[in-house]
Image (cartoon, rainbow, N blue to C red):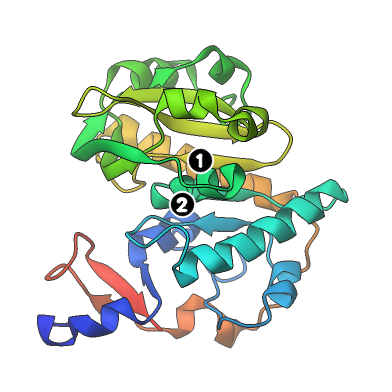
Amino acid sequence: MHINSAILCIFAVVLCIFQCILEYLGGHTKLDQGPHVAPRPRDKYETIFKKINGLLLIGGAVDLETSDFAKVAKIFYKLALKANDAGDFFPIWGTCLGMQLLTVLVAEKNLLTATPAENLSLPLDLTQEADTSRMFSEIPHELRCALTKEPLTGNFHHYGLEVKNFNASTKLRNFFSVLSTNVANNGVHFVSTVEGKKYPFYGWRANLNFPHSRHAVQLSSLMAEFFINEGRNSLHQNDVKDEELIYGYTPIYSANFSGYEQAYFF
């Protein structure tokens, strides 16, 4: 199915999930083999929380405090904090805008500033904390070396968290370890990867579907596998019915109005 600019107004008021994000989590597996993705209405969040094994906060372009995306994410964030404190393991992964949102939720304020890096692939400047991190512990030596030398991470953002602003925030310092940083087009050093010290919460600045080199694809695959394995540590019971899964919806062709080939609308 194709979509044209005449109905783009719908884009702003319905839920949209791009196909590549689903493939990032589930690939092309059968329903009973991989992680299941289920779109849900805005109510019954506590019920939903008990049925899912992790939360992926995707990228995009919405307000990080007033949008429905931010408001719902805050509900799940607080539920995840409470659950983990009670010994109920529940991971959260924030990609791009999702990482920005995680920092806003933890800091309880928006500390983002201009860190332009549009359509820019970069290697990561790893910190000492990366050596003992959970996120990077299983990365093979060859790929780890490539990660610091080759432009494996795609950046498509105008704002980010400056290193100095992270260091100035007691809440962020106490909550996260910084695993990598990068330099924006304006020379500003920004945080590009974070990992929760106590909680299984992770922030990944890069976009998951770009670039497409061998090492870049391998890196994206390993990051996805890591988060999926974190979700397997959750004891939440998934009784989502097949008809509620994403497979019951038909993707549309979206390359004529976005940078993605297919998208789901709800």
Give the quadrant of the N terminus.
bottom left
265 relative position to 135: left or right = left
Q: Which residue is painted at 22% across and 65% down in the image?
A: 261
Three-letter amino acid code of the residue under disc 1: Gly
Residue 98, label in figure: 2
Q: Residue furthest right?
A: 86
Which image quarter: residue 5?
bottom left
Name the one closer to the observer, 141 or 237.
237
**Residue under pointer 1:** 203
Q: Position of residue 3 (x, y in %)?
A: 17, 82
Name the one closer to the observer, 123 or 173.
173
Question: Do labels 2 and 1 touch, CB within 8 Å?
Answer: yes
Circle 2 sits in a helix, a strand or a loop, which is it?
helix
Relative to 99, residue 261 above or below: below
Q: Position of residue 40 (x, y in %)?
A: 56, 80
Badge 2, how many Cα within 10 Å: few under 14, some, many 20+? many
Q: Is residue 69 visible?
A: yes
Three-letter amino acid code of the residue under disc 2: Gly
Relative to 253, residue 190 above or below: above
Q: Which residue is painted at 48% across and 77% down in the image?
A: 246
Give the quadrant of the C terminus.
bottom left
Q: Residue furthest top?
A: 128
Name the one closer to the observer, 240 or 101.
101
Which image quarter: residue 117?
top left
